[in-house]
Structure formats: C-alpha cells, structure tokens
Image: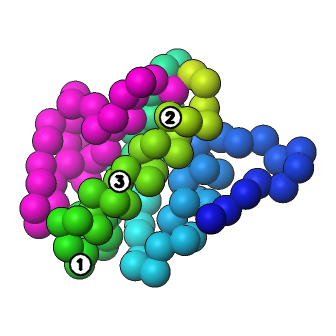
Amino acid sequence: VSVLEKGVKADANRIIEEVIVNFKEEVRVTDITQTKDSITVTFSDEAAPAMKVSEEMEFAMLDCIAYSLLDNLDYCNEVYFKTNEDGYSSTYNSWAHNEPYASK
C-alpha cells in the first residue's frame, strides 16, 4: 500500500506510479491521457497487465489502477485502457478504444 506524503498533490501520473510500484510484475505505461472527466492509460503490449500474467492477475492489476484513479480524482468519471490505437488487447481480453473499463 502506498500513501502520498503530506502536501503532495495527487494526479493521474502519481497515482498510477504509486499503484504499479506495488506490483512484482513489470508494468510498462507508455502514455496517460486526461480529459475533463476521463483518463486513458496506454500499456505496452509486451508486459503486464497485457502479457505475462494470468487472467485473474490482469483483472486485479487493472482494477487497482482504475479504482485508485476513480476514488482519488474527483474529476475522473471514466477510465479507459489501451494497448494500441484500436483499444485494449491482451492474452485473455480485448475491448474497443471507446469502451470504458470502469466508471463512476
């Protein structure tokens, strides 16, 4: 579990960094895009959570990231995950670029 130091402002980059540092698997985030009410996180398709983990671990990792963003950023109402321009694709799952993974 990570806790930000007093006075440190939480933003999407910092929250994602604090979440993935707690995973033993290598997670490679290649881009984080924010709009007024959503965040899109793009992962490398050569590392976790898209590769090299079980389906259960993939969902656990995605859930941790998504709900950390939704719970800690008032403006964030939807979280999208991508591995390419078409959307998210992993060993076990796939969804379109315009399909939110989680929302409030």
Query: Percent x, y for residue 39?
Result: 45, 34
Quadrant in the rendering for residue 59: bottom left
Residue 63 visible (yes or no): yes
Q: Which residue is under mark 2?
A: 70
Quadrant in the rendering for residue 104: top left
Q: Secondary structure at mark 1?
A: loop
Nearer-the-camera pick, 47 or 103: 103
Q: Label 2 sits on what residue type?
A: Leu
Q: CA separation, marks 1 and 2?
A: 26 Å
Q: Is residue 77 magenta?
A: yes
Q: Secondary structure at mark 2?
A: helix
Going 56% across and 70% down the picture, which residue do you hit?
Answer: 21
Q: Which residue is under mark 3?
A: 62
| Marker disc for residue 34 | none
Q: Badge 1: how crowded within 10 Å, few (<14), some, or many (20+)?
A: some
Query: Percent x, y for residue 10?
Result: 71, 42
